[in-house]
């Protein structure tokens, strides 16, 4: 096979382009670019002993390849980045999902509002970020809105100004009450502008402006306003120092370093503005060696900046890159200006690189210690339950309903002791009667195993251990289904104490296995039980909320299932639909139906305002 592929590669032209490697099933497993396709691709099938273990493993699975010729090596780089983002080949250096780096979006309208989004779009809005995670972005936004007393409600301005009384937030001084009509559009946009400056990291200049406004107000004997400005100035200074807000600002210097420990690599990015360290991002990669460090750095840079579509003026890396000049050129197109990718050897920049390298080493060591602790916990769990080996995949199941109605089941997954959320699954119970936990579990397990037997990758592999929220009866209900499918997977029930924490595991014969004396196991099982319960309750509430929305909308003449789905897809929540104007509703509905919907909600509002 290697000889055939080598012969095919030797027929390629000495032109720039992108090559796409496929396995026996036709799946894309690697995408790369080349200055000369013939030279680059043929190297994969020659002198195999010189390849790194990762490359050798990839080449062993290649059954065919195809190429796309481009006008230049730079065009090949752009195409490579786009194709990797689209196909996510398993042998390319891949970052976590785009949702891991959210942005704050400021809408472009008369009264702009902030929201959290997964990635920027070409829509004229302003974007701040990326943040290290959604929780960080939410904390930044909530703190900024609170500092400047901006509204957090779903009202739309200026449409809803003066239509209702200010809410509790206005009464307790947490909102400037734009809805009251006492805040002009100019004042509102001035506050928005101050938030933007804070998000951009320009907190020092902003704090000085607020100080001057405070002193001016005090001279004019407007003491209440002066006190409010003083509090806001102090909050801005504190937020700047604590780096709660500006961690999402566009940095002017990114320092990126890679380190490898064992078979795992870590890339750490430190973001700087004006010489101040503002934020850190990290990514881990498995199955790598020190020889892969250059590929890790290049892969991280290509994917991260492809996702953010923004670049700082300077990017420092801890080793020379094969495509360093071209990466500088590409980043310059994102910044619309000159960008420097450098490997500093001395001075302050070298200290910054060494700091990033030290951070990467620390992250690898901490992860290694956590995994050792988790591994020991799984070994202890296997000993307690008499399992032949530590369970690598554990599935937790829980049933949730509301007074016997709307029954759902949730499946949470742990792989090697860590939650694997993309493997979670949820089920609407269709056959078991309301409140029948045994029947609901049996139906869930039957459907789960059937999907696995059909080859559904979302339900593979099968678990090494099943943990059920319940006791002996629930365990036996699952055992029965497993026997019918010819499976022999260990099943135990999670028996809870008075504080709703799992105190023991029980088998189908009623034997209990205490775990309280083993804190590591107690924590592991307790976390799975809580996560499974949370996932089940969340799904049940979502379905209930959807049912309430649909029942409300279905009472409006002219709205059938199809139109309700279109409204929900366009506007999301019932509250958002309720606040839409007739013109906005007409984007989805016929004009006469949009008018009926608006009249229905207006009539409802009038009833609610009557004493």
Image (tube, helix red, strand yellow):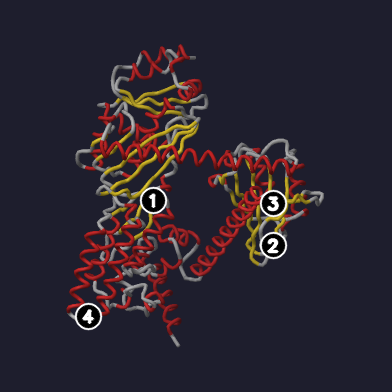
Tell me: 572 left or right of 470. Answer: left
Instruction: Tell me the residue that label 1 is attached to.
Output: 102
- Mark 4 vs mark 1: in front: 4
Looking at the picture, how far across and down is residue 288, in whole percent? 47, 29
Which dot marks residue 434? 2
Which dot marks residue 468? 3
Mark 4 or mark 2: whose residue is earlier in sequence: 4
Q: CA distance from mark 1 to mark 3?
A: 35 Å
Q: Quadrant of residue 432?
A: bottom right
Mark 4 or mark 1: whose residue is earlier in sequence: 1
Which dot marks residue 258? none
Label 1: few (<14), some (14–19) or many (≥20) C-alpha neighbours in 10 Å: many
* Camera-side residue of 378 and 410: 378
Looking at the picture, how far across and down is residue 340, in whole percent? 23, 36
- Which residue is at a point 42% across and 78% down the rendered structure image? 605
Mark 3 or mark 2: whose residue is earlier in sequence: 2
Find out whether the residues at labels 3 and 2 contact each other: C-beta distance under 8 Å: no
Q: Secondary structure at mark 3?
A: strand
Instruction: Tell me the residue that label 4 is attached to.
Output: 222
């Amino acid at each position: 096979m290697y000889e055939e592929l080598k012969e095919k590669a030797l027929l390629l032209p000495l032109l720039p382009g992108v090559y796409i490697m496929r396995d026996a099933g036709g799946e894309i497993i690697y995408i790369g670019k080349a200055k000369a396709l013939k030279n680059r691709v043929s190297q994969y099938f020659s002198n195999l002993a010189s390849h790194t273990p990762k490359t050798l493993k990839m080449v062993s699975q290649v059954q065919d390849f195809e190429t796309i010729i481009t006008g230049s090596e730079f065009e090949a780089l752009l195409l490579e980045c786009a194709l990797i983002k689209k196909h996510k080949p398993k042998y390319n250096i891949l970052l976590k999902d785009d949702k891991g780096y959210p942005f704050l979006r400021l809408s472009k309208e008369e009264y702009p509002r902030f929201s959290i989004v997964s990635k920027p779009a070409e829509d004229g809005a302003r974007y701040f970020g990326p943040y290290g995670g959604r929780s960080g972005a939410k904390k930044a936004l909530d703190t900024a809105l609170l500092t400047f007393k901006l509204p957090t409600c779903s009202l739309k301005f200026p449409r809803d100004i003066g239509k209702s009384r200010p809410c509790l937030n206005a009464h307790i001084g947490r909102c400037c009450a734009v809805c009251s009509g006492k805040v002009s559009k100019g004042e509102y946009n001035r506050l928005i502008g101050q938030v933007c400056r804070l998000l951009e990291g320009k907190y020092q200049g902003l704090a000085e402006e607020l100080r001057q406004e405070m002193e001016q107000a005090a001279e004019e004997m407007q003491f209440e306003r002066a006190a409010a400005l003083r509090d806001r100035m102090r909050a801005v200074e504190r937020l700047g120092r604590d780096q709660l807000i500006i961690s999402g600002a566009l940095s002017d210097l990114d320092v990126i370093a890679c380190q490898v420990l064992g078979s795992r690599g870590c890339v750490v990015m430190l973001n700087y503005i004006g010489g101040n360290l503002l934020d850190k991002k990290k990514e881990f990669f498995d199955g790598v060696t020190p020889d892969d460090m250059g590929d890790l750095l290049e892969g991280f840079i290509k994917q991260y900046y492809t996702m953010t579509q923004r670049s700082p003026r300077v990017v420092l890396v801890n080793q020379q890159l094969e495509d360093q000049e071209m990466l500088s050129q590409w980043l310059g197109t994102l910044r619309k200006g000159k960008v420097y990718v450098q490997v500093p050897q001395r001075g302050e920049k070298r200290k910054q690189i060494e700091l990033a390298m030290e951070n990467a080493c620390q992250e690898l060591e901490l992860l290694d210690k956590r995994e050792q602790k988790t591994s020991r916990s799984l070994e202890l769990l296997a000993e307690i339950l008499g399992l032949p080996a530590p369970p690598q995949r554990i599935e937790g199941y829980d049933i949730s309903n509301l007074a016997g109605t709307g029954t759902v089941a949730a499946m949470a997954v742990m792989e090697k002791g860590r939650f694997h959320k993309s493997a979670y699954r949820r089920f609407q119970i269709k056959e078991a009667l309301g409140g029948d936990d045994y029947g609901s579990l049996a139906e869930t397990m039957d459907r789960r195993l059937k999907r696995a037997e059909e080859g559904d990758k979302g339900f593979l592999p099968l678990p090494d251990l099943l943990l059920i929220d319940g006791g002996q009866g629930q365990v036996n209900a699952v055992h029965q289904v497993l026997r019918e499918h010819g499976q022999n997977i260990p099943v135990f029930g999670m028996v809870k104490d008075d504080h709703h924490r799992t105190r023991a595991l029980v088998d189908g014969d009623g034997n209990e296995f205490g775990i309280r004396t083993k804190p590591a196991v107690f924590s592991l099982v307790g976390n799975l039980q809580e996560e499974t319960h949370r996932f089940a309750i969340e799904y049940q509430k979502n379905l209930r909320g959807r049912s309430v929305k649909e029942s409300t909308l279905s009472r409006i003449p002219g709205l059938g299932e199809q139109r309700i789905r279109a409204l929900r897809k366009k506007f999301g929540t019932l509250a958002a639909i309720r606040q839409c104007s007739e013109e906005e509703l007409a984007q989805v509905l016929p004009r006469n139906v949009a008018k009926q919907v608006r009249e229905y909600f207006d009539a409802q509002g009038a009833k609610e305002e009557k004493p």
